[in-house]
């Protein structure tokens, strides 16, 4: 009976997925929340509903969701549908293993160990360890926990007893702000260090910020660099910051949630050449490796640290001292139940090998070079940085200069019209006081022709909007 209904459900799912990934539907078509609430009945009730109603809702769910599988979806740091990873995701749900102990997740555990080995090899951590986490945000949180444990091990039992200070660049992802909150460091003790025009942390400014904390009697403990910043795609310089961290005995973390996969590419890995100098690295598989959300890892250069910082409890019923004890990943984690994300990453990786990721990255990097070259040829476009990775922040700059707020409004209106015309689902972003359109190249199905057409449509839309007279102040 159960077997029968699984088969039926998979058949229905197959049909729904076919519609979902059809090229014909718009990249985004959901109305605003108020309207959708009127249109869609998501209420739950005492009485159960027939399977057909659930099927209908699954259909609605997928067709109203933005088409993140489409090459037109370049709004976020992920895009594309990966059938092999998707297969892994479905099998994961059917198996429903949890990752605390080997006993209940034997194959997924071996796969997670292998993934961690491969990631560490790419990063250059010879004795490295790691554990999979829900995303870059949790990876950054765990990195800061490891740093806190190094600087102040008694915090685990007695709570915080000194003022610890963390440093990230002004371009770092907001998850470090969440981490200082969760870990009891306090947001006043997260110092945002100035970055240069390209969004890279300025090592001298970092050194000065540390000196200021020391002068106040505070205890610096953590430097969080970024490999591939969220808006500009900048890579912070690792070697000079590693030198600073060594001199002050601080933890050095690299948030590579977006940009660490550059290490697959022989041609471009120089952007993160010194990754082995860090104490820990965050890496998301659900961004550039194109695995369904969520899948990420926190890697450490030295073994044993995750267990030291994260373990506690559970030995009375869960973590038995048996032959498999060394394979119990749960003591490295802050979670108890943890989904077996390893399988979908393993499937996606096994299918294409390291070479597949290298090809994808090299292809997208070349597209970016060509896109930037084309943009620079066209009149009235302005780049807000010199892109080196897969983020391009640009804007339309009319002949007659307009105010910053009018320019931002223009970028917002261009993005809305691109979406309306079903050309692209892009977004605007602000950086260093300027706003523009942020193009993210994460989907290997995107073509040079498509990007060319995107630019021409941007130009045409911008000219029409300027002619409307609404953006001329
Ligand atoms: C640089 C960087 N770090 C961390 C994160 C957070 O990652 P996640 O969404 O996987 O928690 C992001 C998300 O965009 C990011 O761009």
Image (cartoon, rainbow, N blue to C red):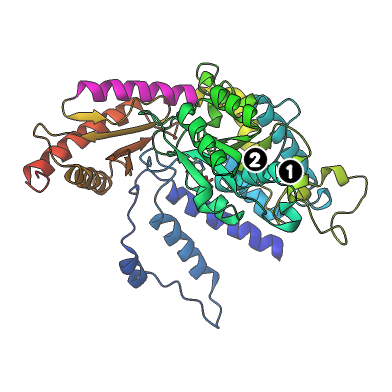
Span highlighted in magenta in the image: 361-378
| Whole-percent x, y for residue 46 in the image | 55, 83
| Whole-percent x, y for residue 255 in the image | 55, 37
Q: Residue at x 71, y 41 (%)?
A: 150
Q: Which mark is residue 25?
A: none
Q: On the rendered structure, is 395 left or right of 24?
A: left
Q: Magenta includes 228?
A: no
**Ligand 1 within 8 A of label 2's CB?**
no
Task: Give the position of the N terminus as an image quadrant.
Answer: bottom right
Task: Give the position of the C terminus as an image quadrant.
Answer: top left
Q: Nearer the viewer, mark 1 or mark 2?
A: 1
Give the residue number, with chain letter if any, for mark 2: 298
Give the residue number, with chain letter if any, for mark 1: 306
**Alpha-carbon span between mark 1 and mark 2:** 9 Å
| Whole-percent x, y for residue 3 in the image | 70, 60
Q: Magenta includes 371?
A: yes
Per the image, label 2 sits on a secondary structure element best described as strand
Kindly check if marks 1 and 2 are in contact, taking CB atoms under 8 A apart as contact.
yes
């Amino acid at each position: 009976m159960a077997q029968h209904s699984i088969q039926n459900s998979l058949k229905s799912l197959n049909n729904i997925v076919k519609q979902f990934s059809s090229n014909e539907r718009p990249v985004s078509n959901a109305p605003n929340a108020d309207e959708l609430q009127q249109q869609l009945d998501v209420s739950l009730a005492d009485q159960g509903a027939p399977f057909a109603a659930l099927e209908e809702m699954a259909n609605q769910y997928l067709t109203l969701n933005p088409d993140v599988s489409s090459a037109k979806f370049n709004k976020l740091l992920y895009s594309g549908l990966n059938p092999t990873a998707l297969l892994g995701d479905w099998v994961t749900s059917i198996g429903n293993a949890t990752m605390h102990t080997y006993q209940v997740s034997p194959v997924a555990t071996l796969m997670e160990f292998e993934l961690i080995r491969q990631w560490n090899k790419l990063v250059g951590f010879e004795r490295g360890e790691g554990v999979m986490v829900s995303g870059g945000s949790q990876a950054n949180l765990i990195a800061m926990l490891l740093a806190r444990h190094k600087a102040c091990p008694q915090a685990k039992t007695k709570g915080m007893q000194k003022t610890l200070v963390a440093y990230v660049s002004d371009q770092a992802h907001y998850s470090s702000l969440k981490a200082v909150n969760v870990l009891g460091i306090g947001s006043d003790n997260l110092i945002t260090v100035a970055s240069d025009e390209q969004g890279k942390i300025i090592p001298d400014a970092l050194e000065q910020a540390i000196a200021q904390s020391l002068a106040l009697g505070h205890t610096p403990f953590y430097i969080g660099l970024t490999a591939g910043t969220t808006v500009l795609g900048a890579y912070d310089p690792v070697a000079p910051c590693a030198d600073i961290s060594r001199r002050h005995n601080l933890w050095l973390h690299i948030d590579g949630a977006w940009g660490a996969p550059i290490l697959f590419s022989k041609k471009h890995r120089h952007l993160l050449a010194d990754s082995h100098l860090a104490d820990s690295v965050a890496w998301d598989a659900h961004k550039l490796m194109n695995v369904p959300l969520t899948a990420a890892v926190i890697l450490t250069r030295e073994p044993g640290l995750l267990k030291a910082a994260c373990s506690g409890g559970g030995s009375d019923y869960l973590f038995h001292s048996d032959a498999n004890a060394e394979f119990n990943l749960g003591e490295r984690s802050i979670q108890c139940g943890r989904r077996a994300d390893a399988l979908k990453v393993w499937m996606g990786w096994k299918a294409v090998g390291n070479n597949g990721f290298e090809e994808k990255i090299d292809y997208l990097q070349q597209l970016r070079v060509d896109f930037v070259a084309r943009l620079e040829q066209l009149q009235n476009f302005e780049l807000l940085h010199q892109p080196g990775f897969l983020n391009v922040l640009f804007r339309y700059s009319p002949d007659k200069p307009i105010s910053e707020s009018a320019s931002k409004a223009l970028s917002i209106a261009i993005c809305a019209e691109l979406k309306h015309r079903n050309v692209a689902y892009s977004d605007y972003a602000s950086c260093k006081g300027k706003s523009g359109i942020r193009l993210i190249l994460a989907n290997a199905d995107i073509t040079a022709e498509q990007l060319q057409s995107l630019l021409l449509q941007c130009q045409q839309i911008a000219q029409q909007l300027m002619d409307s007279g609404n953006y001329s102040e």
